[in-house]
Image (cartoon, coloured by chain):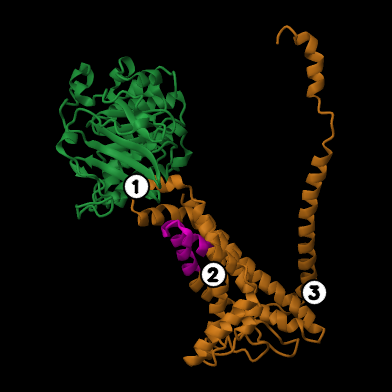
């Protein structure tokens, strides 16, 4: 790729003209002939926010700038394009769910948002991931700093083999936290709705907890570094329904402070727990693309695309 | 299913009975047990034989055997120089081979790009571990002895050459076992670290290495035990057979002729006098004890580290 931007020496994102900046429509893959069957440009992003039910209209003004915006993002594992031409917006203090069948690139897409994919050799990003006005893939950006702003919770609970306290304190200690660490640990565990269960055994290993508790510990660990955004990659797929519900309730509570993006296989979970839903599908060439993105209620009750309707009603995937 | 229940009850009852004798299974588990017993029997015979011959001498001489110098008179010969030499070699090997080996393993596992060159290096390190130890002895002679001779540390045939030779000898082993211990740390731990904004150095230092330490310790101490038992490379790298060895004489600790326990075993085993047979066995017991102490120390360290988690 040819670039005229000296600052983007590593991954030059394409220059965007003004029309792509407008927050109304995705960029459908009209160029790709294999996509002919899919109706183009049916989807509207979060213009519908103002029409949201009154419940969370208060927390998220309709025209607030998205905290993360993907502009025409494609991601490559070597020569294989895993997702293509993704343009989505992640509204602040809301829960955005990414749903779609296996192989549609949900996790890949999520991991482009905090540059976790950088850890996989031979991968490449095109397009730009804009976080609060900054392109996260610009040459001057340190991926380590990105992940301090945009934390992550993984599919399988992965507490460190350390005490509960040390798990939560790990991130702040990395950053040279100078304040009252005990208070921070307590606050983080409280926000993760775990404090009452572990306050008497903070010195025990994090691995001694149940699966659901471990996952909430991982959320507490992510919270402790005060990120703006928390990415969750199928956080409940290894948990039983009760633990799943706890995590969902927790998400609803903490979205006041954080923005959450969650990948889920579970459509009920997306319907229950999210404000916005992005539906990905896999194209014939194996690359994931956005079929539709809208308010969750719209996606599940009145989707614009036939494919979305088939998926959310369980007819495929 | 329920309609045929009464009819098939007898058949179910019969089919649940294990009436066939699993002959192959019995033969196989018998084979497993026989293999284990064979290994144990060999070990028991070897150790028993040595203890039977060597223990009376050790009991009779007591610590005198450990504190006496080498001598051509069996009743006065001791293993002091060998003990000191082996201890010094152990320290040198630990100080040289462990850091270099562990750092190399960290680089290969955590930093090196996963490309063809890295794989080639990995394979070749494994090949190095299979090179006969006598070849390392020749290397020690050609490189380290010549080097110390050139810079005037004695005649070059000193314990520095021996220590370096043994360190190089076990370096591949240290690298392989450390790399495997690092590889065994689940990737989810690394991801968790990166996910909360840890740098690569922080992930390696605070998450990967602490999890890998028990495995690294086990591997490195096994490598050390091997180094302490080596004879051939030390002979080539200038270890002295016999009582000229001055290691233990403080004045010329590094520059003078040295020896080690396996060298003494080798030397005494060739002596014609019958008394030296018992002494050889006694020296073997001392060598075994030194190795066991090194292993016990590693297990102690590992358990101490494990408790921190």
Q: Which residues are magenta?
A: B98-122
Vertical arrangement, residue B34 with respect to residue A255, above or below: below
Confirm whether residue A11 shows in the render.
yes
Mark 2, Cα crowd under 10 Å, few <14 / some 14-19 / many 20+, is: many
- Rendered image quadrant of residue A202: top left
Labels 2 and 3 touching (C-beta < 8 A): no
Task: Report which residue position mark 2 lands on.
Answer: B171
Q: Is residue B172 above or below residue B57?
A: above
Label 2, label 3: how far apart the Cα atoms are:
35 Å
Main SS of the magenta part reads helix
Residue at (54% x, 89% y) in the render:
B156
Q: Is residue A220 left or right of residue B105?
A: left
In this structure image, what is the colour of chain A? Answer: green
The chain coloured orange carries which letter?
Answer: B
Residue A144, given in percent of the width and then of the height, sits at: 30, 50
Label 1 element class? strand
Q: Position of residue B68 (x, y in %)?
A: 66, 85
Pointer 2 chain: B
**Does residue A198 appear in the picture of this structure?**
no
Q: Secondary structure at mark 2?
A: helix
Question: Circle 3: is it few (<14), some (14-19), or many (20+) Cα within 10 Å?
Answer: some
Residue position for label 1: A124
- Residue B116 painted magenta: yes
Q: Give the Cα separation between the discs numbered 1 and 2.
A: 37 Å
- What residue sits 35% from the left and 18% below the top? A306
Q: Quadrant of the N terminus of chain B?
A: top right
Q: Quadrant of residue B136?
A: bottom right
Residue located beneath label 3 in the image = B53
**Chain letter for the residue marked with disc 1 in the picture:** A
Q: Nearer the viewer, mark 1 or mark 2?
A: 1
């Amino acid at each position: 790729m040819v670039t005229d931007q000296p600052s983007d020496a590593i991954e030059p994102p394409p220059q965007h003209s003004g029309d792509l900046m407008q927050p109304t429509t995705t960029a459908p893959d009209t160029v790709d002939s294999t996509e002919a069957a899919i109706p183009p440009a049916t989807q509207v992003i979060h213009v519908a926010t103002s029409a949201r039910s009154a419940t969370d209209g208060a927390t998220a003004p309709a025209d607030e700038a998205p905290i993360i915006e993907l502009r025409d993002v494609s991601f490559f594992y070597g020569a294989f394009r895993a997702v293509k031409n993704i343009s989505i917006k992640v509204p602040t203090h809301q829960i955005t769910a990414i749903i779609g069948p296996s192989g549609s690139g949900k996790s890949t897409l999520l991991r482009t948002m905090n540059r976790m994919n950088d850890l996989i050799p031979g991968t490449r990003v095109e397009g730009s991931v804009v976080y609060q006005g900054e392109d996260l893939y610009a040459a001057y950006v340190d991926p380590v700093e990105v992940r301090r702003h945009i934390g992550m919770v993984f599919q399988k609970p992965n507490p460190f083999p350390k005490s509960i306290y040390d798990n939560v304190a790990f991130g702040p200690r990395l950053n040279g936290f100078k304040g009252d660490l005990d208070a921070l640990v307590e606050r983080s565990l409280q926000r993760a709705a775990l404090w009452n269960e572990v306050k008497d055994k903070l010195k025990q290993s994090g691995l001694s907890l149940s699966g659901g508790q471990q996952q909430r510990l991982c959320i507490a660990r992510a919270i402790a570094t005060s990120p703006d955004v928390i990415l969750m990659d199928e956080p409940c797929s290894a948990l039983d329904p009760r633990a799943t519900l706890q995590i969902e309730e927790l998400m609803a509570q903490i979205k006041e402070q954080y923005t959450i993006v969650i990948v889920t296989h579970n459509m009920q979970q997306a319907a229950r727990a999210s404000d916005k839903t992005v539906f990905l599908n896999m194209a014939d060439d194996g690359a994931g693309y956005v079929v539709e993105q809208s308010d969750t209620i719209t996606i599940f009750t009145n989707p614009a695309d036939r494919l979305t309707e088939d998926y959310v009603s369980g007819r495929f995937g | 299913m329920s309609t045929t229940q009464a009819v098939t009850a007898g058949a179910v009852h019969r089919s649940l009975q294990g009436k066939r004798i699993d002959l192959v299974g019995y033969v196989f588990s018998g084979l497993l047990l026989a293999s284990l017993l064979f290994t144990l029997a060999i070990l028991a015979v070897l150790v028993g034989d040595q203890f039977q011959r060597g223990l009376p001498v050790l009991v009779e001489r007591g610590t005198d055997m450990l504190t006496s110098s080498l001598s051509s008179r069996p009743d006065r010969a001791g293993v002091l120089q060998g003990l000191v030499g082996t201890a010094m070699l152990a320290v040198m090997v630990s100080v040289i081979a462990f850091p270099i080996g562990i750092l190399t393993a960290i680089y290969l596992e955590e930093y090196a790009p996963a490309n063809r060159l890295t794989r080639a290096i990995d394979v070749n390190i494994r090949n190095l571990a299979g090179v006969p130890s006598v070849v390392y002895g020749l290397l020690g002679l050609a490189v380290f002895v010549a080097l110390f001779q050139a810079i005037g540390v004695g005649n070059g045939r000193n314990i520095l050459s021996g220590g370096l030779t043994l360190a190089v000898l076990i370096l591949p082993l240290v690298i392989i076992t450390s790399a495997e211990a690092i590889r065994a740390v689940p990737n989810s731990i690394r991801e968790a670290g990166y996910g909360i904004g840890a740098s690569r150095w922080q992930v390696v230092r605070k998450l990967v290495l602490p999890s890998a330490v028990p495995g690294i310790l086990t591997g490195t101490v096994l490598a050390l035990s091997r180094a302490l038992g080596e004879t051939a490379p030390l002979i080539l790298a200038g270890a002295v057979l016999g009582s000229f060895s001055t290691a233990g004489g403080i004045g010329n600790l590094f520059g003078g002729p040295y020896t080690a326990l396996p060298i003494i075993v080798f030397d005494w085993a060739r002596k014609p006098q019958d008394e030296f047979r018992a002494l050889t066995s006694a020296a073997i017991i001392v060598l075994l004890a030194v190795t066991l102490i090194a292993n016990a120390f590693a297990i102690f360290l590992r358990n101490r580290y494990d408790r921190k988690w």
